[in-house]
């Protein structure tokens, strides 16, 4: 049964048409995939469907009614954003049932016992390990992600559930938990919109699909009638070879390492040692929480080291000082773009310009002319899509923000570059661009470290892979003569795996 | 293409507060024949000079994402210490004044160091240090004004150059330096970066703690300068100097587009904001409103100005 029907929706912003004649039909009991590259208009469409923004053109009918006449009907649509929007200092149960009157847990006085009892039910259903009384900041990230979905489903009037990349921070087992929940919803007669960049997930869970590109509706149909390569072509506008090899070419036998790390210990990891050579991409594999990001952040100086040492070209490396690391040519690109990457209120120009001030500032201050020229070059080289460099960076799409951050790092001519999950939440085409950038860098002699939880990504890019589990390294492998199984075993802590290599 | 006037304001956030300032100025001219006179202008300029110096320091801290509630008290303490040094201490002004500017800088630096090392919220910390500095002031003066200032310092407080009050000229010079620092130097860019996102700033290799301490130091220095100029103007070192310099500079900065959450705005906007407050307070006096009502009226107008500003900002955001 058709529940929601949107006809020729459009949304204009001055100078840009973010959405142009997009139609979408949601049927109860089906999962609708919304696919498209970053900036294709998915978020704009979702905002219109949830009633948080009004369309410039077109119409929406929900359950046969015009929602602008009956705004209460928007309450049947629940939206789970990609970022975590929980209250970290409140308990799991409180987060689930906020605002309490909606769930009947007290209009004036909160009924804590009843609330925690009811919470248990949701936690079991979603296989969340946390207890109702736990504070959200103390529970694991996957649990938080699932809790967000559980929170949306406490809405008893819910007919449509919109999930915006719910799996980007999850491992395979956790993704399966999300999927079983989605299947339950489907069985219960809900319409689900599922936004994802991961092809295997799309084909596993989807029934219908709509592809957006540059704000237009490109294709719509049933997942069963469509292949992976067709979908990618619809999203990117051109056929793309997905399984390219991005490993840098060049020999690196009998050379001295550029950087060597010895018995480094810090928060959540112990005794990590490795060598890094110029001109290579070294992969770091491990589950979320295995300590791989912490190792790199400690080496970079953002986190405090407990013990251990490192040397760059035989000279002692100063730990715990990011400005030393940057001055020595080491850069760390965090997976947390929002928290560790962009300066949200500043323009794209200032965001990129901040790293090249040594070139643009003279005795009379920063030269706007020089800065504009340098930044324009970065925007061109890294194909950052924006209407002007004066635009606030937080208004750009995620993929373009990522390209801006990478472009900014490149502009400083680094020697060691650490990419932490650089393609998290990034569309297929931009992914390939990022792989290409990493390869080009390595071939120019830069030492690149790639942290990733996607085995495919690591195998595609890295020639050598170090695996981590629970804060220690569990093996080092040459990509060429290692199977996926060996790597997976190593990141799940099967120590014996390293001897097979 | 017809240019949308809102787009012009959006392109330069300073335009909004500048237009508001011009409108209020024009209304004041129309409202009172006593407003646009040389004498009244110099009254406003003089009032603006002192609170303006604090505002510049506070605005720079706010850009960084910090607040210092002890700036007014630092100004008062440095004023009375200078007063004591030049009277009972017998020090010549040429020694006492730089020493007290240094004292202000050190008190500011102390705030910055405590915030950085103890990782405290500056708002909370400076409530504490304001209590300490204000307490030291009272211990030293026992609440009694210090009289008998050397006459040669009065030029800095009461003097005029081409009819323009000297403290106002000093404030303008400081403003020009502050605008240059924030808008044109790497140091200023780093301030905005820290105010935007401390973690990202650190990942870019910016020396966050050093910059934070330096900005607190500058703000303390400016507070001491304001205190000393006030002593020069009054001819006595009043223990109460700086009492009214706490909230007005914050309100002025917010009116001028500096967010309390950091990362945006400019000292110039903050001074426009301070000018709006100074004009409003002046026109209240010209209309002969009872002094007991002045706080109420100026408070209400500040709230209105801030609401107007945030409403127009929302409107701009909707438009774009």
Image: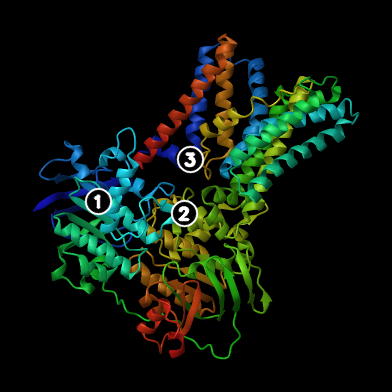
Q: Distance between the residues labelled 1 and 2?
A: 38 Å
* Residue at the outermost left position: A1
The residue shown at (78%, 19%) is B144
> Whole-percent x and y of residue B272?
56, 31
Foreground mark, 1 or 3, reads 1
Quadrant (top left, top right, bottom left, bottom right) of the C terminus of chain B: top left
Residue under circle 1?
Answer: A153
Question: 10 Å neighbourhood of mark 1: few (<14), some, or many (≥20)?
Answer: many
The chain identifier of the residue carrying mark 2 reads: A
Residue under circle 2?
Answer: A348
* Nearer to the camera, A86 or B62: A86
Q: Which of marks 1 and 2 is nearer the N terminus?
A: 1
The residue shown at (19%, 65%) is A206
Foreground mark, 2 or 3, reads 2
Residue A342 is left or right of residue A455, and the answer is right
Q: Is mark 1 on a helix, strand or loop?
A: helix
How many numbered marks appear? 3
Of the numbered discs in the image, which one, if any, rests on residue B12?
3
């Amino acid at each position: 049964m058709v529940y929601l029907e949107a006809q020729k929706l459009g949304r204009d912003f001055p100078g840009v048409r973010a959405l142009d004649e997009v139609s979408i039909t949601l049927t109860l009991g089906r999962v609708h995939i919304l696919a498209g590259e970053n900036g294709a208009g998915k978020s704009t469409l979702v905002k219109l469907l949830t009633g948080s923004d009004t369309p410039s053109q077109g119409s929406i009918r929900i359950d046969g009614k015009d929602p602008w006449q009956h705004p209460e009907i928007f309450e049947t649509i629940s939206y789970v954003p990609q970022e975590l929007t929980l209250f970290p200092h409140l308990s799991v149960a409180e987060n689930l049932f906020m605002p309490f009157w909606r769930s009947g847990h007290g209009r004036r006085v909160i009924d804590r016992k009843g609330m925690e009892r009811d919470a248990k039910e949701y936690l079991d259903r979603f296989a969340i390990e946390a207890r109702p009384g736990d504070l959200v900041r103390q529970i694991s990230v996957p649990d938080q992600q699932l809790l967000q979905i559980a929170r949306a489903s406490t809405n008893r009037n819910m007919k449509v559930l919109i999930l915006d990349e719910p799996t980007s921070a999850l491992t395979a087992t956790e993704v399966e938990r999300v999927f079983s929940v989605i299947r339950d919803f489907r069985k219960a007669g809900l319409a689900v919109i599922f936004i994802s960049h991961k092809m295997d997930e799309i084909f596993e869970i989807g029934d219908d699909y709509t592809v957006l590109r540059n704000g237009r509706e490109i294709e719509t149909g049933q997942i069963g009638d469509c292949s992976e390569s067709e979908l990618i072509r619809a999203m990117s506008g051109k056929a793309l070879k997905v399984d390219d090899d991005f490993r840098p070419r060049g020999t690196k036998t009998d050379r001295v390492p550029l950087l060597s790390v010895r018995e480094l210990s810090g928060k959540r990891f112990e005794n990590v040692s490795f060598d890094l050579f110029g001109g290579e991409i070294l992969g770091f594999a491990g589950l979320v929480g295995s300590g791989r990001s912490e190792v790199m952040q400690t080496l970079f100086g953002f986190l405090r080291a407990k013990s251990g040492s490192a040397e760059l070209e035989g000279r002692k490396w100063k730990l715990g000082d990011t400005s030393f690391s940057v001055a020595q040519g080491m850069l760390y690109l965090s997976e947390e773009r929002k928290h560790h990457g962009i300066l949200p209120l500043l323009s794209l120009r200032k965001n990129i310009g901040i790293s090249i001030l040594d070139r643009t500032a003279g005795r009379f201050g920063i030269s706007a002319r020089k800065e504009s020229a340098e930044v324009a070059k970065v925007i061109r080289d890294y194909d950052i899509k924006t209407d002007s460099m004066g635009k606030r960076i937080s208004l750009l799409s995620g993929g373009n923000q990522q390209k801006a951050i990478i472009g900014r790092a490149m502009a400083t001519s680094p020697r060691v570059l650490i990419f932490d999950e650089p393609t998290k939440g990034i569309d297929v085409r931009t992914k390939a661009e990022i792989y290409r950038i990493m390869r080009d860098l390595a071939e120019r002699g830069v030492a690149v470290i790639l942290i990733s939880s996607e085995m495919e990504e690591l195998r595609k890019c890295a020639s050598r892979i170090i695996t981590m589990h629970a804060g220690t390294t569990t093996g080092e492998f040459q990509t060429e003569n290692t199977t996926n199984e060996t790597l997976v075993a190593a990141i799940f802590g099967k120590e014996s795996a390293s001897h097979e290599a | 293409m017809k240019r949308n006037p809102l787009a012009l304001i959006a392109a330069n956030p300073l335009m909004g507060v500048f237009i508001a300032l011009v409108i209020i100025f024009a209304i004041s001219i129309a409202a009172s024949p006593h407003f646009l006179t040389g004498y009244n202008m110099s009254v406003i300029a003089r009032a603006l000079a002192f609170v303006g110096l604090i505002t510049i320091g506070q605005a720079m801290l706010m850009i960084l994402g910090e607040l210092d509630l002890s700036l007014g008290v630092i100004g008062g303490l440095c004023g009375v210490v200078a007063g004591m040094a030049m009277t009972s201490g017998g020090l010549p002004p040429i020694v006492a004044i730089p020493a007290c500017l240094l004292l202000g800088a050190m008190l500011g630096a102390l705030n910055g160091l405590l915030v950085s090392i103890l990782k405290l919220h500056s708002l909370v910390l400076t409530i504490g240090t304001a209590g300490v500095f204000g307490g030291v002031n009272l211990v030293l003066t026992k609440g009694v004004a210090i009289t008998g200032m050397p006459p040669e310092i009065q030029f800095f407080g009461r003097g005029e150059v081409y009819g323009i009050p000297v403290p106002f000229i000093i404030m303008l010079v400081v403003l020009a330096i502050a605008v240059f620092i924030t808008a044109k130097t790497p140091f200023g860019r780093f301030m905005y970066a820290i105010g935007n996102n401390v973690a990202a700033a650190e990942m870019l290799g910016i020396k966050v703690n050093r910059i934070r301490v330096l900005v607190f130091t500058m703000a303390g220095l400016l507070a001491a300068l304001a205190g000393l100029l006030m002593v020069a103007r009054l001819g006595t070192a009043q223990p109460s100097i700086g009492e009214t310099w706490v909230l007005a500079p914050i309100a002025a900065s917010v009116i001028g587009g500096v967010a309390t959450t950091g990362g945006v705005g400019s000292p110039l906007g903050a001074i426009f904001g301070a000018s709006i407050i100074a004009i409003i307070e002046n026109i209240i006096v010209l209309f002969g409103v009872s002094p007991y009502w002045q706080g109420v009226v100026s408070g209400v107008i500040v709230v209105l100005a801030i609401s107007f500003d945030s409403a127009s900002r929302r409107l701009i955001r909707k438009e774009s």
